[in-house]
Image (cartoon, rainbow, N blue to C red):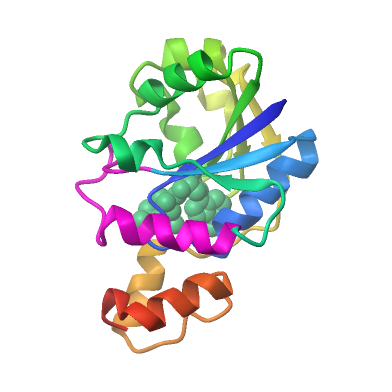
Amino acid sequence: MKVGIMGGTFDPLHIGHMMAAEAARYTYGLDEVWFMPSHIPPHKHEAGVSGADRLAMVLETLRAHDSFRTLDWEITRGGVSYTIDTVRELKEKYPLFDFYFIIGADMVQNLPEWHGIEELVQSLTFIGVGRPGTPLDLEALPGFIAEKVLLADMPLVDISSTMLKERIAEGKSIRYMVPDAVFDYVQRSGLYGI
Ligand code: ATP
Ligand code: MG
C-alpha cells in the first residue's frame, strides 16, 4: 500500500488542499490519501475553530471520495501536533505501508525546521506541490532533505484558509473555493461568522 498523508489545519478545508492531494495521488500512483487535521500545529498558535468542526468538514467532504480517507489521530490526541509523533504511530500500526507526506511549497521551504526532520526523512518521502508566493526550490534545502522530496505538478491555486476567512469577514463569497460540503457546513453552523 502506498499512502499519502495530507496534513493541515484545514481551517477551513479548501480546493488547494483537494487539488494537492489529487495531484500527489495520480502522479505517484498512491492507493489512498489520508487527510489528517492537526490539533494545534507547531507553527501556529491555535486554530480559529474547534478541532471537531475542522474534522467534520473534512469527513463530510471526503465521504464522496473512494481513495481519500480521514485520520483523526492528531485531533484525538490533542495538544501540539508534531508530525513525527504521528508518523511513528503510523509506522508501528502499518509497518508494511509506504508513506508519503504531501505539502505545499511554503511547507517545503520550512522542512529544515520540522521537529525530528532527520527521522522523518528516513520514515517517509515528501511530495511537494507549487503554491503562489513561495518558490519550490529544492536546491535551497540541505541535501539529506532534498533527496526525499518528490514534486507533483498542479495548477497554482491562490487560495489559503486565511484568505477565505478574510473574504468571509468582508462579506465576499467563498463558494467554489471550498468543496460544496464545506460551504454547506459553514453556512449551516454559522462558522467564521458567515
Ligand atoms: P492557513 O492560511 O491557515 O495557513 P492554508 O491554506 O495554508 O491555511 P493549511 O491547513 O495551513 O492551509 O495547509 C495544509 C497543507 O496544504 C500545507 O502543506 C500547505 O502548504 C498546503 N496548501 C494549502 N493551500 C494550498 C494551495 N493553495 N496550494 C497548494 N498547497 C496548499
Ligand atoms: Mg498554511
Residue 92 position, x and y percent, is 49, 13
Using the image, determine if residue 55 lies above or below residue 25: below
Image location of residue 168, percent across then percent down: 35, 81
Q: Which residues are magenta?
A: 38-62
Image position of 58 with respect to 2: above or below: below
Quadrant the N terminus occupies: top right
Q: Quadrant of residue 187?
A: bottom left
Count how many numbered circles sit on residues in the image.
0
**Identity of the residue drawn at 39% across and 76% down:** 186
Q: Nearer the viewer, residue 25 or 55?
A: 55
Query: Does residue 133 appear anywhere in the picture?
Result: no
Does the magenta-highlighted stretch encompass residue 41?
Answer: yes
Q: Residue at x 21, y 50 (%)?
A: 46
Assess whether residue 112 is covered by the magenta stretch.
no
Question: Is residue 182 in view?
Answer: yes
Q: Residue at x 45, y 63 (%)?
A: 57
Which residue is painted at 30% across and 43% down in the image? 39
Q: Quadrant of the C terminus?
A: bottom left
Which percent across, then down, holds residue 35? 52, 45
In the image, is residue 82 above or below residue 164? above
Where residue 81 sits in the image (x, y, percent)?
30, 34
97 or 193: nearer the viewer = 97
Asked which quadrant contains residue 24, the reply is top right
Q: Is residue 97 left or right of residue 189?
A: right
Q: Is residue 191 left or right of residue 139?
A: left
